[in-house]
Image (cartoon, coloured by chain):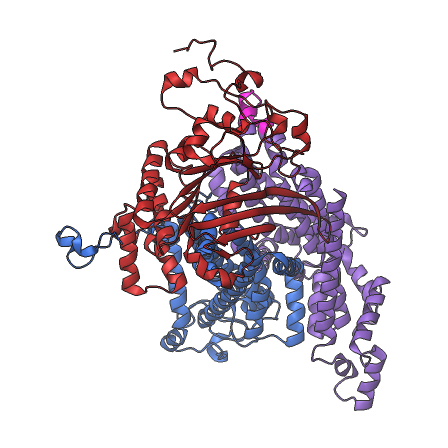
């Protein structure tokens, strides 16, 4: 073996013990740097962080204000006619038709929206990546079957089927999460499958195979890292869709069961009272809009950071 | 080309069949007994059994499925558990509302969406483009029911307070009865459905048109001295609109199965409202009927769209 | 029976790709005859050059040898063992002995992995060397191929084309293979870099006692590195000979045509050379010509050529290792340029437009 042994290298300080390693700038790190410079995306990220904080700290906020989300403050929270009270010192955002503190309810609603939004998205992405990866990598019969299966799922009338499903098993938080995940995963799967099909043909996959790498190793070490970018982008864009989906289910009375507050069922109730209580529409609606806007803008920023060549969706510059 | 059509049709039939199986499994095999619900809480076990027998729920599963399919083939969707009508007549009676809503909204969102998209694509990064972007952003972030609510509040309620009654807050008047009232009652629902879709279409159009306008053949057309207007509308738009057409087919197909949220907000007696009602009352034959109809419409729309795509884009035919 | 000196024997290797069409069930409508009966042997320590134009099947053959493809028929015998029909698991130990260097320096390295990890892959896959020991060996390899071991943690995007090809070389040599198939390793590089890589490969061959099959479409490159050269056309080997014999005295008309088009350094010689321009395009491998596949374009073709495929054998007056598949091999007196209908040097009769 005539390779140069390390000990025979010229003795400069850098070579004394081990070769000094120069850190490479990974594509992810570069993307992160680009994201940091994007003001709109950063503002969105901060907004989301605040929302998460609010969701986590909901009991604390309730304690500080002294009100409970489900208690009906009939004395102070309703007018003598039994109508909701507007924003005031005592009730920051007013009350609802049962005299409950709207502010606290909106705060607690954040928990549901974020929880359902994130969890169902994570489930959908996990399932979508698994199926898409398997379909794209193994091709043949496996792919035909899985791809057709995804096409069929995508052909279902989403909302209609969702409410039909809920009608059978009864509404609940868990059901909402699973139903939303069920109708979201196929879109992810289709994209992942497409990407996998093209990555699979790349020469470095062939090289890995010629080295003797097994299928699983190639999938995890070679294919998956190259899927990360589109998957991350899709995830950030899927979350607001899931949140909207959940709020729609709640609006129709098929989401989380009352009296648990969600923005959707608050807005549903507000339908009957908007003529006397504009705050009942405005504040949950604003919360919902802010949340989805923040995620959409962040997702757009993430997509731009990972691949600056694509046209920005919500171009702010 | 014929091969392509056959393949699409076969696939469509497969999808429909699978959905029918899924629907059947979920509704008939699920751990839920509609017989009990219909018979009432105070019914004796004999009564419940009798109801079950009348409904055919005590036969073996495969037989029920066969019966189900056979009925479907005849267009018979069964009888509503709670109304005394056949499911088919129920659906048919609701169809005009949903169709009015869908088609009217489609016209609006197409004109608005494509229009805005084209304007934005012609002047990238201008004020128009920024405005369009803002519009897209809001549209994509808002759930339909919220749009409906806000429209109700501002265009119905506040105007109502001000004495203007041009936009009723709900209800439906058939076209045959009074076209003007019909349109008037549908304005807000149309805008509601159209708002989110217009945003989607404007983004789609803008993106697609920008891409097409960057192509070499457009550059050649400009170099030949063809006016910008002709370049955009005759040359560019023709290719750029194919994804829009595709999407349109799917969206219309989906909506015809029931614009659930909007009908709910505005109290329109369409398929969507029927669906929600049936779900609440557990009226399974009706739910099944609507789901199957919606699935059928979506599959049909997909096939039509695919065929259209093949007609418009020769590359698809040859692949 | 197997010669211990022979590392690789390729015996009548055939690789066809079926073309399928159909609505629900796909039926075979035709086949692409990518490789149609190729045989040769490679001795230990030698370099066999494999030349041909795009579509002649050389890359497909490379992948058959390394078992990235399954063979339609024929045998590949490596170090005395028939590896043609071994399962993936049985092939695994052979993966250490046969390695491949790929053509595209930009596509053959995973852009999301660090270079050290890429070169360390063979160690990881075969369970040799772990942790810091693996790292050390990777860094040794980097130095051997001329890379700075400090760049262990860099990503492929941070290297130039030539350097990336070096990474590919390092990866291929990690487990000290016996046989290395180089699939057009310099075709995608700039000319000045090509020489560097070729020299590197030559040095490494001496240092590690490697056997190469060197695939290229450029004859001049192959000449420099090869002991023997095989010329392929439309899935078959048309001529195979020691390098010097092939270049000095090509016997197959196709070889002669290729040589007449190869770049020559001396402009005066280039001017005086007569170009043999072949008529027509390379036929499709789906439906190759009958008889000798080259006959539609051959300036020496006669009736027999359209009917009877020629055997790859030694022609009279050639050295024993010089095999040609041609009924009417090129003689010294032939003027193929005239026969092909394009006489004279490029640029006019005897005068160079300079």
Q: Is residue A47 above or below residue C312?
A: below
Give the quadrant of residue A211.
Answer: bottom left
Asked if the stretch drawn in magenta spans residue B226, the answer is yes
* Quadrant housing the N terminus of chain B: top right
Left or right relative to B121: residue A29: left
Q: Is residue C226 left or right of residue B91?
A: left
**Quick one: quadrant of the C terminus of chain B?**
top right
- The shade of chain A is blue
Seen in the picture, residue C291 relative to A267 is either above or below; the reply is: above
> Which residue is nearer to you in this view: B79 or C236?
C236
Q: Which chain's colour is purple?
A: B
Q: Is residue A212 visible?
A: no
Instruction: Specify start and end residues of the magenta stretch as a single range.
Output: B219-231
Rendering colour (chain C):
red
Membership of A14 in magenta stretch? no
- Main secondary structure of the magenta stretch: helix
Q: Position of residue C164 (x, y in %)?
A: 35, 45
Question: Residue at left 57%, top 47%?
Answer: C13
């Amino acid at each position: 073996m005539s390779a140069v042994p390390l000990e025979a290298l010229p003795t400069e300080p850098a070579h004394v013990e081990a070769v000094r390693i120069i850190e490479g700038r990974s594509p992810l790190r570069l993307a992160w740097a680009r994201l940091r410079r994007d003001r709109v995306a950063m503002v969105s990220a901060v907004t989301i962080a605040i929302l998460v904080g609010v969701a986590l700290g909901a009991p604390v906020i309730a304690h500080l204000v002294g009100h409970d989300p489900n208690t009906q403050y009939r004395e102070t929270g309703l007018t003598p006619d039994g109508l909701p009270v507007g924003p005031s010192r005592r009730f920051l955002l007013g009350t609802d038709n049962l005299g409950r503190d709207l502010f606290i309810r909106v705060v607690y609603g954040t928990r549901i929206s974020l929880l359902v939004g994130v969890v169902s998205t994570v489930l959908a992405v996990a399932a979508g990546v698994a199926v898409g990866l398997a379909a794209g990598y193994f091709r043949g019969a496996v792919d035909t079957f899985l791809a057709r299966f995804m096409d069929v799922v995508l052909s279902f009338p989403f909302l209609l089927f969702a409410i039909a499903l809920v009608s059978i098993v009864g509404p609940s938080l868990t059901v909402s999460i699973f139903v939303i995940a069920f109708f979201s995963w196929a879109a992810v799967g289709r994209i992942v499958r497409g990407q996998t099909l093209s990555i699979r043909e790349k020469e470095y996959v062939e090289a890995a195979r010629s080295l003797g790498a097994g299928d699983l190793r190639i999938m995890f070490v070679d294919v998956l890292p190259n899927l990360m970018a589109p998957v991350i982008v899709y995830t950030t864009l899927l979350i607001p869709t899931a949140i909207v989906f959940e709020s729609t289910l709640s609006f129709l009375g098929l989401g989380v069961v009352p009296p648990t507050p969600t923005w959707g069922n608050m807005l549903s109730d507000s339908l009957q009272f908007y003529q006397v209580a504009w705050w009942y529409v405005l504040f949950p609606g604003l919360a919902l809009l802010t949340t989805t806007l923040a995620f959409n803008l962040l997702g757009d920023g993430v997509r731009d950071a990972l691949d600056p060549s694509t046209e920005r969706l919500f171009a702010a510059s | 080309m014929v091969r392509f059509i056959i393949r699409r049709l076969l696939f469509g039939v497969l999808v429909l069949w699978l959905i029918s199986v899924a629907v059947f499994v979920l509704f008939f095999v699920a751990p839920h007994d509609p017989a009990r619900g219909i018979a009432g809480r105070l019914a004796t076990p004999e009564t419940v059994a009798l109801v079950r027998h009348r409904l055919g729920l005590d036969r073996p599963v495969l037989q029920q499925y066969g019966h189900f399919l056979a009925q479907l083939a005849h267009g018979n969707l069964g009888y509503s558990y709670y109304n005394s009508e056949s499911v088919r007549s129920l659906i048919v009676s609701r169809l005009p509302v949903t169709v009015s809503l869908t088609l009217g909204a489609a016209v609006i969102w197409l004109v608005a969406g494509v229009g805005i998209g084209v304007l934005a694509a012609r002047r990238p990064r201008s004020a128009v483009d920024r405005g369009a972007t803002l519009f897209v952003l809001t549209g994509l972030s808002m759930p339909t029911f919220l749009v409906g609510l806000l429209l109700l509040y501002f265009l119905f309620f506040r105007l109502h307070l001000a004495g203007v009654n041009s936009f009723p807050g709900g209800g439906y008047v058939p076209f045959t009865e009074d076209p003007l009232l019909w349109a008037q009652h549908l304005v807000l629902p149309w805008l509601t459905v159209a708002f989110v879709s217009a945003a989607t279409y404007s983004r789609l159009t803008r993106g697609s048109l920008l891409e097409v306008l960057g192509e070499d053949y457009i550059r050649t057309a400009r170099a030949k001295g063809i006016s910008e207007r002709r370049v955009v509308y005759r040359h560019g738009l023709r290719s750029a609109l194919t994804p829009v057409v595709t999407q349109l087919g799917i969206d219309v197909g989906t909506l015809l199965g029931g614009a659930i949220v909007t009908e709910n907000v505005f109290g329109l007696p369409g398929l969507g409202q029927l669906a929600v009602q049936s779900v609440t009352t557990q009226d399974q034959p009706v739910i099944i009927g609507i789901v199957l109809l919606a699935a059928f419409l979506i599959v049909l729309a997909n096939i039509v769209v695919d065929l259209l795509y093949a007609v418009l884009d020769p590359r698809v035919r040859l692949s | 029976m197997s010669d211990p000196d022979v590392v690789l024997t390729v015996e009548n290797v055939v690789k066809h790709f079926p073309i399928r069409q159909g609505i629900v069930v796909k039926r075979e409508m035709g086949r692409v005859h990518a490789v149609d009966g190729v045989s040769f042997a490679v001795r230990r320590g030698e370099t066999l050059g494999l030349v041909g134009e795009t579509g002649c099947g050389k890359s497909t053959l490379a992948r058959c040898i390394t078992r990235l493809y399954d063979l339609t028929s024929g045998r590949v015998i490596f170090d005395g063992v028939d590896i043609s029909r071994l399962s993936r698991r049985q092939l695994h130990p052979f993966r250490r002995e046969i390695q491949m260097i790929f053509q595209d320096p930009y596509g053959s390295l995973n852009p999301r992995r660090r270079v050290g990890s890429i070169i360390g892959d063979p160690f990881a896959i075969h369970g040799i060397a772990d942790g810091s020991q693996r790292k050390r060996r990777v860094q040794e390899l980097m130095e051997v191929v001329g890379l700075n071991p400090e760049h262990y943690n860099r990503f492929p995007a941070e290297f130039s084309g030539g350097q990336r090809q070096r990474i590919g070389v390092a990866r291929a040599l990690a487990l000290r293979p016996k046989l290395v198939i180089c699939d057009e390793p310099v075709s995608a590089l700039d000319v000045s870099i090509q020489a560097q890589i070729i020299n590197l490969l030559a040095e490494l061959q001496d240092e590690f006692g490697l056997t190469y099959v060197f695939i290229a479409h450029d004859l001049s490159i192959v000449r420099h590195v090869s002991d023997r050269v095989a010329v392929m056309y439309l899935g078959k080997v048309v001529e195979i000979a020691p390098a010097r014999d092939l270049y000095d005295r090509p016997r197959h008309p196709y070889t002669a045509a290729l040589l007449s088009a190869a770049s020559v350094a001396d402009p005066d010689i280039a001017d005086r050379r007569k170009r043999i321009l072949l008529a027509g395009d390379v036929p499709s491998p789906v439906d190759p010509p009958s008889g000798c596949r080259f006959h539609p374009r051959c300036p020496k073709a006669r009736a027999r050529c359209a009917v009877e495929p020629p055997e790859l054998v030694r022609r009279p007056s050639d050295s024993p290792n010089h095999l040609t598949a041609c009924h009417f091999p090129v003689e010294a007196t032939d003027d193929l340029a005239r026969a092909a209908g394009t006489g004279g040097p490029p640029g006019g009769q005897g005068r160079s437009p300079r």
